[in-house]
Amino acid sequence: MTYDKRPEGRKFDELRPIVAKAGVIPNAEGSAYFKIGKTVAYAAVYGPRELHPKFLQNPEKGVLRCLYNMMPFAGMGDRVRPGPNRRAKEISLVTEKAILPFINLDRYPNAVVDVFIELTQTDAGSRCAGICAAAIALADAGIEMREMISAVAVGKVADKIVVDLDYSEEIYEDGHVADIPIAMGNVSQQITLLQADGYITREDLKKCLEIAKKACAQINEIQKKALKQKYEGSK
Amino acid sequence: MNKRKQILDALDKNVRFDGRKKDEYRKIEVIKGVSATAEGSATVKIGDTEVMVGVKLGIGTPYPDSPDSGNLIVSAEFLPLASPEYEPGPPDIDAIELARVVDRGIREAKAIDVKKLCIEKGEKIWEVSVDICTINTAGNLFDAATLATLAALMDTKFPKYENDEIDYKVKTDQRLPLEILPVAITVIKIGNHFLVDPLPEEEEVLDARLTVTLTEDGSVCALQKGGDQPLTVEQIDEMIGIALEKSKEFRKLL
């Protein structure tokens, strides 16, 4: 089976349209809006602030906490019951691990940096959109970062290697689908989020990871632009 | 000098924290259609306060005491995204009160003709789920949430429904049977002063709060008093008068 045509006439290595903004939530230390295709994530960073209860504090370095949540109306089908389900908990966990290596928590002993991610609408790729928003929000909050973090799903639909799968591709039925969400730092290009749903050969996986580098570099430019826009505006 | 005295002294000179008049709202913005996955949605900004409301439609079974009526369910979540004071977890009492006040306004105004949401008497009805989500809280959530709910209900279109199945990907042109548009205005009392659209600093020191929900003809359809201090009949009447005036301005935004 061959996969010939992507929705909206996208090229196989083309990202969906992206809109990114920094500083959208006045109460937060840092915040961001990240829209990719029809998936929209907000992220807010609170802290570094004192961590309670106290026994959770680490005098050597700060603690990072990430919370991924879908608004009840953000799913593509029925209403999603509010509150953390197993899926949201797992995504919160892998989001935390995706960000952790790139921020310098040594600077914030006994403190916590809270990252809250909210999805207002989704069409696949929501954990990656959440990580992209979180990275902008962390930078906006002035949290010391070793590298900027960008995330995107890559994978294979039937015979084609593709970037940034939408929902219709995730559920494509005329052939195997592999959906591989990835996050990486913009300097080292080291990977901190790696999951895969579906069949993929070792060779194809390598191709996917290479193509992810290019896509993440593009996203990184958009993230930087969003941050520049905010701070150039206030000059 | 304590906060309350500071605010009161300023109010005696007719000055508020941000330079507004006592009966003046901050800039209000209503944006409909903000979530593509909801059947209807809206964001309302009042100053720095931002609330997003989404409406989902589903099929449910009617309550035994109203077998031919659809259901309305309003929930509110104070997302930790919106304020350093919110923590993750199930809705606390303030979020529950907010959801119930919004619910009461719509329900008691009979804003939605729930009989038109009946698919099969006693068996199948449309369920209208309203979810209020905070994006940034900076005072006066009640008015923002009610206005956003109304705007989201106005924005709502039914999904395709065929052979007992909903296809959420296809929206029809059919809108909710929204007959009446109730708006809520909250008036707070600090000392001898009545204020609308309070800032968090003002809410913190208020004596009493009255949320008045009004329909287009100026009838009151729901009330909620809050705050620790009592109100006299005269005071309540004056607060309702203020709410009535302000509700006319509010309507122009819809």
Image (cartoon, rainbow, N blue to C red):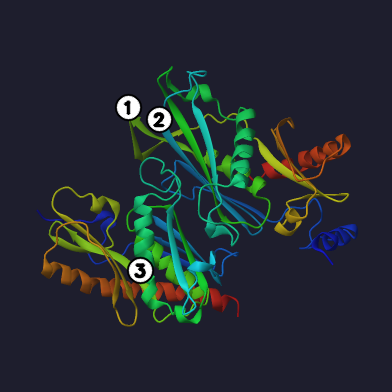
Chain to which mark 3 belongs:
A
Q: Is residue B49 above or below residue A208?
A: above
Kindly tell me whether residue B156 is visible in this rendering: yes
Separation of disc 2 and disc 3 at Cα? 39 Å
At which x and y percent is residue A59? Answer: 49, 78
Q: Are marks 2 and 3 on the same chain?
A: no
**For residue A47, side relative to residue A92 (left or right):** right
**For residue A143, side relative to residue A6 (left or right):** right
Residue under the point 53% across and 54% down: B79
* Other-residue count near label 3 (Cα within 10 Å), few / some / many at <14 / 14–19 / ≥20: some
Q: Which mark is residue B59?
A: 2
Q: Which mark is residue B130?
A: none
| Residue underneath mark 3 | A97
| Residue underneath mark 1 | B164
Q: Amino acid at mark 2?
A: Ile
Q: Amino acid at mark 3?
A: Lys
At which x and y percent is residue B133? Answer: 53, 49
